[in-house]
Image (cartoon, rainbow, N blue to C red):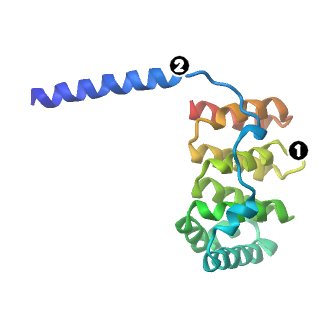
């Protein structure tokens, strides 16, 4: 029993030390130009044809539902499509990002931004930051982009969020950014 207690104490101390030293690393804002990022086309090229067709088919189904229905209906009636995207994983991101930039339907963009948070991948941060900073974007989509960054749980997003906080004018978006920054710290 004493050995278990001693192990827990040592484990806790090691964890605290590791957290302390990880916070001591020099932090700097990295501009998007410095981030090694392959083009979306190069990433899409690596996805097998069957998977590409599957993802595109899912996105067309969601787009059809989003076209003529309220957002709540879209969320409830695309759960199976969301599960399929999440099951396919991070390789869906380049296709999702392409659709994000290509669709004019805000409910579709909301859905895509939501999925980018669930499928994961550090490369999703910058497209989500672009959504957050875009004053012409629907407010619901911008706030969802903040939540998606929160779901990604990458501390590296903090520097970008700090810059975004200074750029955006919308007080609700600023507050949401602050919430996500605090969560990620």
Please determine whether, in this image, residue 34 is positioned above or below residue 136.
above
Q: Let me know if residue 72 appears in the view.
A: no
Q: Nearer the viewer, mark 1 or mark 2?
A: 2
Residue depicted at x 82% and y 60%:
101
In this rendering, the answer to whether 57 lies above or below 103 is below
Assess whether mark 2 and mark 1 are in contact (beta carbons under 8 angstroms). Answer: no
Label 1 element class: loop
Q: Name the residue tied to disc 2.
A: 24
Q: Give the vertical position of 159 relative to 141 (above or below).
A: above
Q: Position of residue 125 (x, y in %)?
A: 68, 46
Residue under the image location 70 percent in, 38 percent down: 176
Mark 1 highlights which residue?
A: 135
Q: Residue at x 83, y 35 (%)?
A: 168
Where residue 36 appears, as percent x and y from the top left, is 69, 45
Compared with residue 3, is residue 145 higher up or lower down, i.e. above or below?
Answer: below
x then y, percent, for residue 84: 56, 72
**97 and 185: which is toward the camera:** 97
**Picture quarter with the C terminus:** top right
**Residue 24 appears in view:** yes
How many numbered dots are placed on residues in this image?
2
Q: Tell me which corner region of the image, top left, top right, bottom left or bottom right, holds residue 110.
A: bottom right
| Few, some or many residues within 10 Å of mark 2 (<14, 14–19, 20+) | few
Quarter that holds the N terminus: top left
- Viewer-side residue, 175 vs 102: 102
Q: Is residue 65 left or right of residue 15?
A: right
Residue 131 horizontal/vertical position (percent): 79, 48
Category of crowding for the residue at label 1, using alpha-carbon neighbours closer than 10 angstroms: few (below 14), some (14–19), many (at least 20)? some
Specify the farthest residue to the left: 1
Can you tell which quarter of the image residue 50 is in?
Answer: bottom right
Separation (CA) of disc 1 from disc 2: 35 Å
Which residue is drawn at the image coordinates 69% and 31% (left, top)?
A: 159
| Residue farthest right in this picture | 136
């Amino acid at each position: 029993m004493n050995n278990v207690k001693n192990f827990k104490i040592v484990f806790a101390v090691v964890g605290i030390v590791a957290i302390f030293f990880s916070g001591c690393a020099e932090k700097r804002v990295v501009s998007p130009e410095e981030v090694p990022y392959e083009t979306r086309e190069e990433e899409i090229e690596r996805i097998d044809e069957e998977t590409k067709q599957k993802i595109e088919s899912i996105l067309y189904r969601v787009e059809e539902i989003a076209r003529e229905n309220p957002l709540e209906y879209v969320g409830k009636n695309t759960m199976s499509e969301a599960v399929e995207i999440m099951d396919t994983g991070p390789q869906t991101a380049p296709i999702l990002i392409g659709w994000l930039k290509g669709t004019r339907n805000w409910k579709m963009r909301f859905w895509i931004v939501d999925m980018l948070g669930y499928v994961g991948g550090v490369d999703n941060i910058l497209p989500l930051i672009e959504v957050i900073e875009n004053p012409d974007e629907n407010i619901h989509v911008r706030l969802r982009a903040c939540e998606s960054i929160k779901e990604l749980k990458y501390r590296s997003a903090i520097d970008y969020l700090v810059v975004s906080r200074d750029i955006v004018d919308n007080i609700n978006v600023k507050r949401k950014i602050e919430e996500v920054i605090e969560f990620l710290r």
